[in-house]
């Protein structure tokens, strides 16, 4: 019994720690600190990769001359990896150069009076995040990622078109929200079809990169990255590790003249507070990023208009599982579905097995396949937030244009 009470007390402290609120000044200070931590990671990239190369060279040279002579291409390949890392660093430098003033209502640059360009060491965690972000360019903005986009994004896009067909709706007034937008390709594709679309992203790694590709890249396949140089295992050929990809495979600036496309920075739960303001919420590999997935469900229910739809595709690889001092509620899909129904959602489309990959290296000897759940859940027309009546709502079609989130850090 004593053990149970102690566990309950620890749980309460754990919850309170998770929900700790800071003053606006402290919140702003922590955000600035986080901003510069990510900038530092971008700047430290080449030095980080060079550390790996030096270690690999040292270990190879520790071999006997006979063993070294058996694989004569190793050192030249490491030299090539070093050159690729140098090239990647130039692209990353361009990304952060365009990120220092990217937000409309926040200025960070003056915070670094002590040599703002200085390279500072970064944690292994942040460097892993950065290397993962580099692979996101493959997934979202390269020809190599087309097959992966077809398996992940295409089913969502087709459902948006089925639910809001252009011959029945003025699609420019159909508002679609894409939380966890990453580098923005899914949201961009939806906006390309004429829908009002807004991507939302919390990660500065993703925000810096999406800002660069969406707002600074115009020439198709004009830029090059080497996304696989960090993978020293499961390579069939030396050339596989250093092969390049080019991006963007389309001109992100080419959207319809009347398009309404934007990206908003911030925590999904905190940014979107306006009830019944979106016709559609589209989530791809997103809901498992929650500390508490039930909070995501309630938020999506709240912000959807009556008759609106939630389209989801993804696994349940909970991001905060086993992470120290982080709240993480790991529910199975069966429990999530039951909670959705209790909230009032009607599941109209459901596929419990859709296989896809995520930032896959298609030449690797180790490849992960996710067996995803795909569903379309409807908020019934008669269901309103705070018991609003039907005659207080705009009917569909046509859909009403979504209000913008004026209090969010936003870039276009």
Image (spheres, helix red, strand yellow):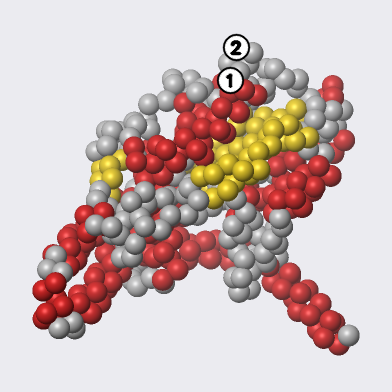
The dot on residue 171 is: 1
Above-or-below relation of 238 to 358: below
Q: Position of residue 64 (x, y in %)?
A: 15, 83
Q: How would you rate the neighbour count of disc 1 (Cα within 10 Å): few for under 14, some for 14-19, many for 20 or more?
A: many
Q: Position of residue 97 (x, y in %)?
A: 31, 52
Element marked by disc 2: loop
- The residue depicted at 47 percent of the width and 49 percent of the height is 358
- The residue depicted at 31 percent of the width and 65 percent of the height is 232
Q: How would you rate the neighbour count of disc 2 (Cα within 10 Å): few for under 14, some for 14-19, many for 20 or more?
A: few
Q: In the displayed orientation, state which residue is furthest to the bottom.
A: 2
- The residue depicted at 50 percent of the width and 51 percent of the height is 369
Element marked by disc 1: helix
The residues tagged by marks 2 and 1 sit, at their Cα atoms, a distance apart of 9 Å
Above-or-below relation of 206 to 55: above
Q: Position of residue 277 (x, y in %)?
A: 69, 33
Snapshot quadrant of residue 233? bottom left
- Discs 2/1, front: 2
Q: In the displayed orientation, state which residue is furthest to the top.
A: 167
Q: Nearer the viewer, residue 216 or 8?
A: 8
Whether residue 401 appears in this view of the structure is yes
The dot on residue 55 is: none
Q: Position of residue 351 (x, y in %)?
A: 65, 38
Above-or-below relation of 273 to 316: above
Find out whether the residues at labels 2 and 1 contact each other: C-beta distance under 8 Å: no
Above-or-below relation of 82 to 404: below
- The residue depicted at 84 percent of the width and 28 percent of the height is 382
Number of marks in picture:
2
Residue that mark 2 sits on: 167
Q: Is residue 189 left or right of residue 334?
A: left
Whether residue 110 appears in this view of the structure is no
Q: Nearer the viewer, residue 49 or 299?
A: 49
Quarter containing the N terminus: bottom right
């Amino acid at each position: 019994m004593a053990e149970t009470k102690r566990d309950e007390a620890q749980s309460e402290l754990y919850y309170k720690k998770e929900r700790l609120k800071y003053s606006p000044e402290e919140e702003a200070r922590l955000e600035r600190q986080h901003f510069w931590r990510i900038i530092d990671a971008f700047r430290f990239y080449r030095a980080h990769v060079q550390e790996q190369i030096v270690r690999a060279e040292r270990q190879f040279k520790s071999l006997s001359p006979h063993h070294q002579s058996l694989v004569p291409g190793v050192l030249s390949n490491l030299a090539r990896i070093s050159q690729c890392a140098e090239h990647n660093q130039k692209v990353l430098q361009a990304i952060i150069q365009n990120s220092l003033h990217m937000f409309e209502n926040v200025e960070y640059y003056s915070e670094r009076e002590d040599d703002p360009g200085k390279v500072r060491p970064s944690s292994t965690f942040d460097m892993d995040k950065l290397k993962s972000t580099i692979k996101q360019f493959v997934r979202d903005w390269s020809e190599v990622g087309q097959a992966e986009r077809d398996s992940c994004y295409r089913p969502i896009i087709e459902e948006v078109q089925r639910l809001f067909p252009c011959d029945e709706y003025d699609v420019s007034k159909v508002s679609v929200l894409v939380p966890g937008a990453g580098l923005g390709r899914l949201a961009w594709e939806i906006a390309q079809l004429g829908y009002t679309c807004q991507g939302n992203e919390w990660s500065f790694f993703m925000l810096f990169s999406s800002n660069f590709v969406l707002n600074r890249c115009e020439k198709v396949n004009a830029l090059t990255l080497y996304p696989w140089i960090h993978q020293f295992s499961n390579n069939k050929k030396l050339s596989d590790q250093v092969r390049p990809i080019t991006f963007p495979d389309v001109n992100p600036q080419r959207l319809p003249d009347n398009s309404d496309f934007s990206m908003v920075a911030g925590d999904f739960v905190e940014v979107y507070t306006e009830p019944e303001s979106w016709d559609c919420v589209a989530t791809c590999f997103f809901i498992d990023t929650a500390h508490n997935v039930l909070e995501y469900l309630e938020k999506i229910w709240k912000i959807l208009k009556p008759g609106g739809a939630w389209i989801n595709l993804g696994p349940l690889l909970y991001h905060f599982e086993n992470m120290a001092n982080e709240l993480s509620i790991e529910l199975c899909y069966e429990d999530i579905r039951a909670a959705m129904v209790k909230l009032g959602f009607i599941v109209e489309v459901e596929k419990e097995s859709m296989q896809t990959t995520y930032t896959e290296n298609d030449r690797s000897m180790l490849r992960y396949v996710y067996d995803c759940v795909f569903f379309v859940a409807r908020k019934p027309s008669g269901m309103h937030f705070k018991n609003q009546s039907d005659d207080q709502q705009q009917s569909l079609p046509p859909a009403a244009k979504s209000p913008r989130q004026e209090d969010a850090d936003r870039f276009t």
